[in-house]
Amino acid sequence: MGARAGAGMGAVRAFVTGATGLVGIHLVRRLREEGWRVRALVRPTSRTALLRELGVQLVVGDLSDRAGLRAACEGVAVVFHCAARPPLGGSREEFYRDNVQGTINVLDACVEAGVERLVHVSTVDVYGYVDHDGADERTPFRPDGLYSRSKIEAEHAVVRYYDEEGLPCVILRPCLIYGPHDRHLIPAVLELLSRRWTPLIAGGRVLLDVVYAGDVAEALWLAARSREAIGQAYNITDGARRTLRETVETFAQALGRSPRFLSVPYGPGYGLARAASALGGLLSVPVPSFLRWEVVKAMGHHRHFDISKARGELGYEPKTSLEEGLRETLAWHRLRAQKQKTEAEEAETVPLS
């Protein structure tokens, strides 16, 4: 990785980890629109065609390669750390390796290379899966599961490097993110809506925040430019106040479906999810996302967060409504599904001799 990172890089403005992920792709596109030269960390197995089309310099490797990260940060003004192990799936060791030690490796590389700023992508999950109605950035951390704990530890590391090493840092805490290139949330919702009955904890009466990936990318761009943002953390949502049921109904309308909802009491639902998650771990079999205890616990509590700080200090203003964002997201998914179908059909075609 190191040799490729150091060869012919030129004057690069930004280095992005997790560039092939949902947030990373939208961020890279935003940076390129502003004329920034971008370097991106990608795994050997990553699909990089879009990044190549955008003129991004690719660095093949991962967050465990300290020397490679150091070379990739050389001459870079801003590092955007978007890479992380997603919430569902992984052992304690894997979450620590990817989300905590991986962040520390990026921080070390930033300090050694003398970058001007690190913008770190965290999550509102650091506040825990308990009731939050208008929670702001002063809300205490509450670890709830391996993912939440690992992201809290990663934030602690960022703050420590800001305090002790003088590394200018900004932390963003997005809520549930969706948009084109999403390979997690939309498939889970599609699976849920495909059933005869769509189960919702407590009838879906709790508040749930979502945000379009393009708006998160805009917030990252603003965080990289605001002098006032250094040393600060910001919640990022679409600013709307809606319930889980209203959100699912909007998804269903975009899909042209009329789901029949089944209200599941939180206590029994959470108990069943705990049992299913434990059994899945014991047998090493995948558990549907709507039966994971973390999902059921989160969907059983209000998750509405205050973004007035991001509005006031970053100038962040969500631009994409849920309806508009879903239209774009589902259009991308349909195009992707058609492309995969075509590729599969071509692969099965046997030429006539």
Image (cartoon, grey):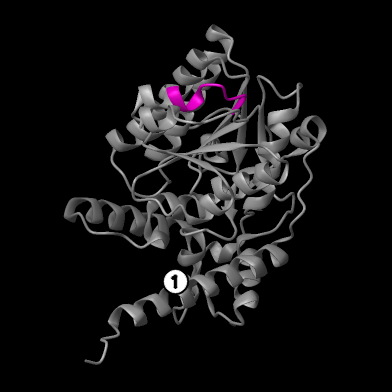
Residue corresponding to mark 1: 191
Residue 39: x and y in percent read: 53, 36
Q: In this view, does 298 lie to the left or right of 13?
A: left
Q: Nearer the viewer, residue 331 or 253?
A: 331
Decide which of 178, 332 is in the foreground and name it. Answer: 332
Q: Any magenta on residue 77?
A: yes
Q: What's drawn in magenta, residue-wise?
A: 71-78
The residue sitting at 48% across, 56% down in the picture is 49
Measured as percent of width and height from the top left, residue 155 is found at 51, 26
Q: Farthest residue toward the bottom? A: 352
Q: Say if residue 121 shows up in the picture.
A: no
Identify the residue at image location x=70%, y=43%: 218
Q: Is residue 45 above or below residue 101?
A: below
Q: Is residue 284 visible?
A: yes
Position of residue 244 measured from the top left corner of the image (x, y, whole percent): 61, 61
Which amino acid, by three-letter code, is at mark 1? Answer: Glu
**Quadrant of residue 132 within the rendered picture:** top right
148 with respect to 35 (left or right): left
| Residue drawn at x 30%, y 85% as measured from the top left | 349
